[in-house]
């Protein structure tokens, strides 16, 4: 069985491999020679993850795809994709499924993070609640579709902190740990993160489907 991951993001690819490599051959779109970047028109993370996985599955099973050259039999390949983002309760309409588009795709996360802290400057601690959400969509060779979701709860920090992670990690404060998710090592973050949780649920689902 192959697992084809519908992402062009190298950081995400690494996390997918770490969890899924154990029991299957894992390929990126690039390794399969597939290009896909569909518009994320869904209103939920699950919908958008399914849009991304569906677009790649269409190419994989389409007449133009030379699967022998790519050594990727569509009848033996699970396509998976993720969609994730940050929900900030005090800024309900701005991030969520639109997290990557907040202030424009080309704006640096340093600028985005500073702007969020500026806008949240007068918001008291109890109202700074936020969560990262990750949905993973899986499409099996028989066309059956599933989604799994993982959540990491936290609060918007008062100051930027940490050099790990990416994106909004430096402003995502974890009250139980007393630090941001950018202060954690990759392994520490994986153990509690939205993506780590969703990925482990996806891996468990694949294992159940493969082993009956
Ligand atoms: P996607 O690539 O469409 O899933 O967009 C994800 C968006 O949410 C991007 O803006 C990321 O920066 C943000 N995001 C998702 N997961 C994380 C995370 O673990 N840390 C920091 N930012 C994240």
Image (tube, rainbow, N blue to C red):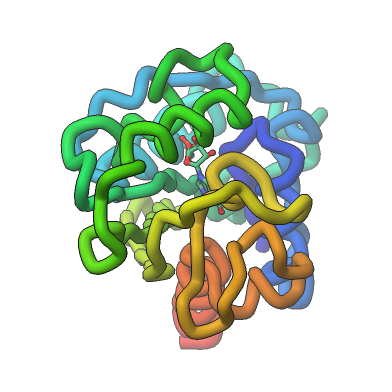
Q: Is residue 64 above or below residue 166?
A: above
Which image quarter: residue 103? Answer: top left
| Residue 176: x %, y % from top left | 49, 84
Q: Is residue 96 left or right of residue 168?
A: left
Between 199 and 129, the residue placed more toward the observer is: 129
Which image quarter: residue 179? Answer: bottom right
| Residue 87: x %, y % from top left | 30, 49
Between 38 and 133, the residue placed more toward the observer is: 133
Instruction: Residue at 80% x, 34% y: name it.
Output: 31
Q: Is residue 98 left or right of residue 57?
A: left
Q: Is residue 123 shown to the viewer in this render?
A: yes
Between 145 and 147, the residue placed more toward the observer is: 147
| Residue 7: x %, y % from top left | 61, 37
Instruction: Residue at 33% x, 30% y: name it.
Output: 98
Which image quarter: residue 109? Answer: top right
Q: Is residue 51 above or below residue 152?
A: above
Q: Is residue 75 shown to the viewer in this render?
A: no
Residue placed furthest toward the front: 122
Instruction: Residue at 62% x, 46% y: name it.
Output: 5
| Residue 48: x %, y % from top left | 33, 37
The quarter of the picture where the N terminus appears is bottom right
Between 104 and 212, the residue placed more toward the observer is: 104
Q: How many marks?
A: 0
Q: Is residue 34 above or below residue 137?
A: above
């Amino acid at each position: 069985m192959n697992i084809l991951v519908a992402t062009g993001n190298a950081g995400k690819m690494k996390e997918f491999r770490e969890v899924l490599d154990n029991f299957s051959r894992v390929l990126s779109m690039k390794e399969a020679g597939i290009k896909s970047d569909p518009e994320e028109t869904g209103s939920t993370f699950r919908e958008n993850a399914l849009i991304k996985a569906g677009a790649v599955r269409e190419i994989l099973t389409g007449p133009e795809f030379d699967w022998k050259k790519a050594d990727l039999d569509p009848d033996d390949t699970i396509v998976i994709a993720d969609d994730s983002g940050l929900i900030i309760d005090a800024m309900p309409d701005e991030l969520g499924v639109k997290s990557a588009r907040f202030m424009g795709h080309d704006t640096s996360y340093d600028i985005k993070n500073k702007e969020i802290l500026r806008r949240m400057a007068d918001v008291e601690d109890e109202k700074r609640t936020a969560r990262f959400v990750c949905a993973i969509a899986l499409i099996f060779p028989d066309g059956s579709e599933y989604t799994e979701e993982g959540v990491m709860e936290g609060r918007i920090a008062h100051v930027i902190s940490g050099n790990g992670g990416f994106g909004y990690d430096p402003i995502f404060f974890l009250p139980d740990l007393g630090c941001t998710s950018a202060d954690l090592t990759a392994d520490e973050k994986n153990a509690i993160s939205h993506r780590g949780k969703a990925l482990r649920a996806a891996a468990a689902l694949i294992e159940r489907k493969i082993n009956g």
